[in-house]
Amino acid sequence: MPGGFKAGNLDGMSKVQDPQLATRHSTLNLIPAVLISLSGFVMFALEQRLIGYAILAVALVTAYFTGRQLFKDLLLLAIGLAAISAVPITTDISFSHMTLMGAAMIIAVGLPYSLSRWVFKDHAIRFPVLTGQKWTRTERWYLLAVVVIGFFLLPVYMIPTGVFENWPAASDPDTVARLFLGTNVLGIWDELFFICTAFTLLRRHMQDWQANLLQAVLFTSFLWELGFHAWGPLMIYPFALVQAWIFKKTKSLSYIVSVHLLFDFVLFLVLIHAHNREWFDIFLY
C-alpha cells in the first residue's frame, strides 16, 4: 500500500483457520458476541454491574453451545471485562486509586494474554511493537492530523459542556504529574485491551467490521463511565472504529498507541487550561 496505511503481517492476528466455516456460522457467533458487548454497555455506560454480569454469563453459556473456540475466546474477553469492572472507574488521581485501578488494568490485559499463550496455547493475543516496518508518509501525516483535530475538537467538547470538571483540578507539580501519568497509562491500556485483546478475539469469529462495531461499544462505554459524558460518544465511537481499522491495516501497537497518546497529550493540555485558564491559553472554544 504505497504512501498509505500499509498492511502488516502477524500470524497470531489471523482469523479462525477455516474462513468458510467462520462465515457460515457468523450469525450464530454474533449472538454471544453482541451479548458480550451489551454487558459492557450495561456495566460501564449504565453502571449496572450485576445486570451486566448476568448478561455476561448468558453470553458465555450461549458461546459454549455455539462453538468451543468461540467460548474460549469470549471467556478471555469476559475475564478482562470482569477484572476492570471490579474497581471504581473514575478519574481520581490519588495514589491509592491509581494503584487499585492500575492493578485491575494489568489483570484485565495480562490474564487473558497469559491464558491464551500458555494455557490455550494459541497465542491469539499479541502486542506487536517492534514490527520492523517503517511508517509511511500517510501514517506520519496522520499523526500530525490527530494533533490538529484534538486542538480544535477537544476544547469545544471539554469546556463549554463542563465535562472537564469530571477530572480533578491539577495545578501543583505533583498533581500535574499524576494527571499526565494517568492520561497516558489509560491511553495505552485502551489500545492493549479494546484493540489488541477485544477486537482481536472478536474478529476470529466474525467479519472485521462486525468485530469493530462491537469493540467500539466496549471502548466507548468504558470511557463514558470514566467521565467522557455529554456528546463524548459521538467523538469516541468513531475514534475507536478508526483505531481498530488502523491496527488491522498496520498490525502495529506502537503506531496506534502513538496516535492515542498524541490525542491524549492535547487532552491533558486542555484539562490543565480548563482548570487554570491562564495556563496554555491557546485554545479556541
Image (cartoon, rainbow, N blue to C red):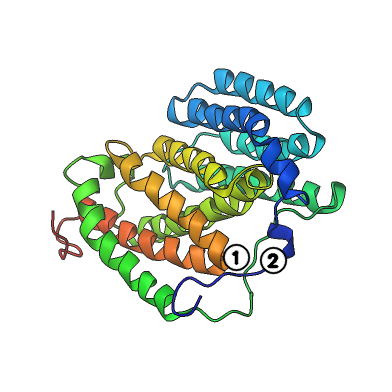
Residue 171, given in percent of the width and then of the height, sits at 28, 56
Secondary structure at numbered mark 1: loop
Residue 91, given in percent of the width and then of the height, sits at 41, 43
For residue 185, say whether it is visible.
no
Secondary structure at numbered mark 2: loop
Mark 1 and mark 2 residues within 8 Å of each other at the beta carbon: yes
Look at 44% across and 60% down and name the residue there.
260
Kind of residue indicated by mark 1: Lys
* Mark seen at residue 25: none
Q: Is residue 20 above or below residue 246?
A: above
* Mark seen at residue 10: 2
Pick the residue in front: 83 or 192.
192
Look at 78% across and 55% down and name the residue there.
123
Pick the residue in front: 208 or 275.
208
Kind of residue indicated by mark 2: Leu
* Mark seen at residue 251: 1
